[in-house]
Image (cartoon, helix red, strand yellow):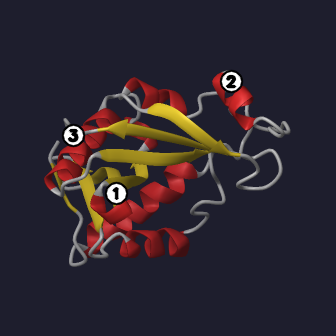
Amino acid sequence: MPIIDLLPSATDLITQTAALLVEGFRDCAPNAWPDRAAALEEVHESFAADRISRVMVNDSGQAQGWIGAIQQYSGHSWELHPLVVSPAYQRQGIGRILVADLEAQVRQQGGITLYLGSDDEMGLTSLANVDLYPNPLEHLAQVQNLKGHPFSFYQKVGFAVVGVIPDANGWGKPDIFMAKRIAAR
């Protein structure tokens, strides 16, 4: 399946991508994009000059997955935001392919590091629903995936856990930070 730039003129793909966001995050982060309007706003924000927006389409031109990135730190680092794969196509390598494509896009822009935050709002890791203070790094060193949190996927594609913001999304709802070097020294 080809991966193409998601463009502002692709109104049908924009609508499909917004639907993917709502459906794809419904169970793991329901407040991220709770409805079509919020998802459409996110998709439209991805067209900014400091962003990359890529969509994988099937042979019929239907969106199967979407990935984006936001330029940060003078272009040396980019934030992967967001990544979503249609639930019907998950666990088939689409996420892995989208990440590899994004890495190539970011390298072409001169990026060295790709990073992301992976929220745990639903108690999917050992970092959720506990007080991570006074030593969050101690908890982070022992992090476990309890119920299918995406951080395990990101580890499989080469990202390392590099930090945590305790209570980022409310008490006991941390944001797990991950990063990956994508360019040679």
- How far apart are labels 1 and 2 at the CA level? 27 Å
Secondary structure under tag 1 reads strand
Pinpoint residue 66: horizontal percent, then vertical percent: 34, 53
- Residue kind at label 2, given as amino acid type: Leu
Q: Is residue 85 visible?
A: no
Say which label, 1 or 3, has the lower sequence index: 1
Please name whichever residue, 72 or 124, is drawn nearer the observer in this view of the structure: 72
How many C-alpha atoms fall within 10 Å of the one at disc 3: few (<14), some, or many (≥20)?
some
Considering depth in this image, is 84 or 101 the residue closer to the camera? 101
Label 2 to label 3, Cα distance in Å? Answer: 32 Å
Among the 4 quarters of the image, the one containing residue 184: top left
Camera-near label (1 vs 3) is 3
What is the x, y in percent for residue 22? Answer: 52, 58
**Residue at 20 percent of width and 36 percent of height:** 185
Q: For residue 146, which numbered disc appears in the image?
A: 2
Which is nearer the N-term, disc 1 or disc 2? 1
Q: Which residue is mark 3?
A: 183
Check residue 68 in the rendering and tell me which mark sits there, or answer none: 1
* Residue at left offset 64%, top offset 42%: 164
